[in-house]
Amino acid sequence: MAAPSPFKISKNGVELVSYIDLAKYNMAELSRRALTDTGKYLRMELIKKIKTLPGMKRHKRPYSAVRWSVPRWKKGAYPKLEIGMKHGTWYGEFQEFGTRSMKKKGWLRGTTEENLAMIRFFEGFYLKEIEDNIKAQALIEESDMQNAEGEERV
């Protein structure tokens, strides 16, 4: 998606240029980039934690079970990060929340709470760049938006 162009109004020799739409776009895209990096980081940390379990050291299951996304389909909505276990994979939701016969493991919640400093670092890195518009546009490049499997996001 291309960045919106500035809105210009000329009346009686006075030209008013509004960059509000561009600023909103930059804020949303930089937030989305920060959430993308956060999702990648939390996924890898969660996989490291799951790999320490007995029988999971060389198993491929954690890589396919843990997913993250920053959905784009809601127009006007502020971007948010969705991370979790793929439904029905390896009893992920049961192990995260527990059942009456199994205690909750809480890997996702624990991993998130342990890495709050890194999440703040990612958010701060992208959102402090909003003042420099050229740098912001370089950070938002559409070709850079790929998920963990290397597929292009829609």
Image: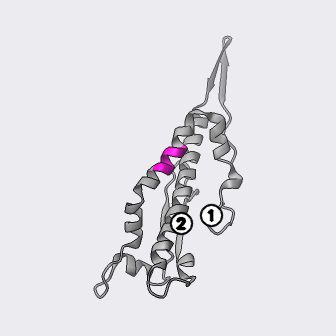
Give residue 143's position: percent from left, percent from top.
71, 54
Image disc number at residue 68: 2
Residue at the left extreme, as displayed: 100
Residue at the top extreme, as displayed: 12
Magenta segment's dominant SS is helix
Q: CA distance from mark 1 to mark 2?
A: 8 Å
The one nearer the camera, 74 or 90, is 90
- The magenta segment is 121-126
Residue that carries the numbered disc 1 in the rendered image: 147
Q: Residue at x 51, y 67 (%)?
A: 43
Q: Does the magenta portion include 124?
A: yes
Q: Residue at x 52, y 55 (%)?
A: 35
Q: Circle 2 — which element?
A: strand
| Residue 78 in view | no
Q: Does the magenta portion include 12?
A: no
Image disc number at residue 127: none
Give yes or no for contact between labels 1 and 2 (Cβ–Cβ under 8 Å). yes
Q: Is residue 140 above or below residue 59?
A: above
Q: Amino acid at mark 1?
A: Asn
Q: Amino acid at mark 2?
A: Trp
